[in-house]
Image (cartoon, rainbow, N blue to C red):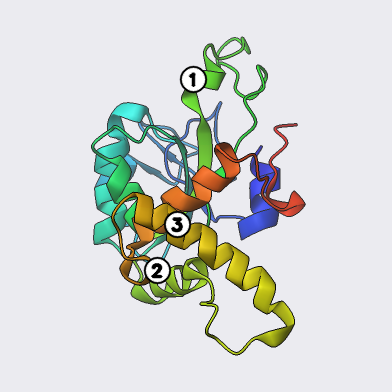
């Protein structure tokens, strides 16, 4: 799974919440004392300047996202797509790239202590999310997501942009939003809607194979 993620965003330098059995990178932070770990307790460490990977317990997602929001770091986070959870809007506000859906294969996750398959994979709807609170990265993503208005002078791709803009404008109107003023969280919801409700697949380079 992580090999495919590195192909998309580059390999992170540290695994923030891992153990000797679960770490996906040579450098990792353990939740308990470990002679091979870089440090203990990621939440007590400073993340500023890091390009990190993190697969946290679901109960810690709100705390993790708030830490990303406070510190100048870039994080690749594995999280379920649960829009009704209170932390979900925070996650959307920190996105700096389109989330990548992980395939709901039964062998996607295994228990570290006995290699048994993790139950209930489809219900998790796991995504890899590239997050940061750095303004330039967020602004660049917002600009990219908003697409190009049909009034822009891009003749070779005009019809393609117009089609995309029309879909987004209609989607916003149905939700009583101004497409020109839509926040990045709404743009991300629209992209996920295209992928999941209309059956549009992401480019081949963003499809994750867990093997």
Question: In which quadrant of the rendered view does residue 26 lie?
Answer: top right
Residue at left 48%, top 30%?
Answer: 19
Q: Which mark is residue 138?
A: 2
Mark 3 falls on what kind of element?
A: helix
Q: Is residue 99 visible?
A: no
Q: Secondary structure at mark 2?
A: helix
Circle nearer the N terminus (2, 3): 2
Checking the image for residue 123, the label placed there is 1
Find out whether the residues at labels 1 and 3 contact each other: C-beta distance under 8 Å. Answer: no
Is residue 199 shown above or below 125?
Answer: below
Answer few, some or many: residues within 10 Å of disc 3's Cα (few below 14, many 20 plus, some between 14 and 19): some
- Residue most extreme to the bottom: 153
Q: Residues within 10 Å of mark 2 (few under 14, many from 20)?
A: some
- Residue 102: x percent and y percent? 61, 35
Circle on res. 170: 3
Of helix, strand and loop, which one carries label 1? helix
- Quadrant of the rendering where the C terminus is positioned: top right
| Rendered position, 80 above or below 204 | above
Q: Position of residue 59 (x, y in %)?
A: 29, 28
Looking at the image, is mark 1 or mark 3 nearer the viewer? 3
Q: Residue at x 56, y 26 (%)?
A: 21
Quarter occupied by residue 9: bottom right
Give the camera-side residue of 94 and 165: 165
């Amino acid at each position: 799974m992580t090999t495919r993620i590195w192909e998309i965003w580059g390999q992170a330098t540290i695994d923030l919440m891992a153990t000797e059995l679960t770490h996906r990178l040579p450098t990792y932070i353990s939740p308990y004392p470990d002679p091979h770990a870089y440090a203990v307790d990621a939440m007590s460490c400073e993340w500023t300047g890091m390009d990190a990977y993190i697969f946290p317990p679901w109960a810690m997602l709100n705390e993790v996202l708030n830490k990303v929001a406070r510190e100048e770091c870039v994080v690749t986070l594995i999280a379920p797509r649960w829009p009704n959870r209170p932390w979900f809007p925070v996650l959307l506000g920190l996105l700096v790239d389109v989330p990548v859906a992980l395939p709901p294969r039964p062998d996607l996750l295994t228990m570290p202590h006995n290699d048994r398959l993790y139950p209930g994979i489809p219900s998790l709807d796991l995504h890899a999310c590239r997050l940061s609170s750095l303004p330039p990265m967020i602004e660049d993503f917002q600009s990219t997501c908003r697409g190009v208005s049909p009034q822009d002078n891009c003749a070779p791709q005009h019809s393609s942009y117009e089609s995309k803009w029309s879909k987004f404008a209609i989607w916003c109107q149905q939700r009583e939003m101004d497409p020109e003023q839509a926040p990045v969280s709404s743009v991300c919801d629209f992209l996920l809607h295209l992928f999941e409700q209309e059956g549009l697949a992401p480019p081949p380079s963003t499809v994750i194979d867990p093997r």
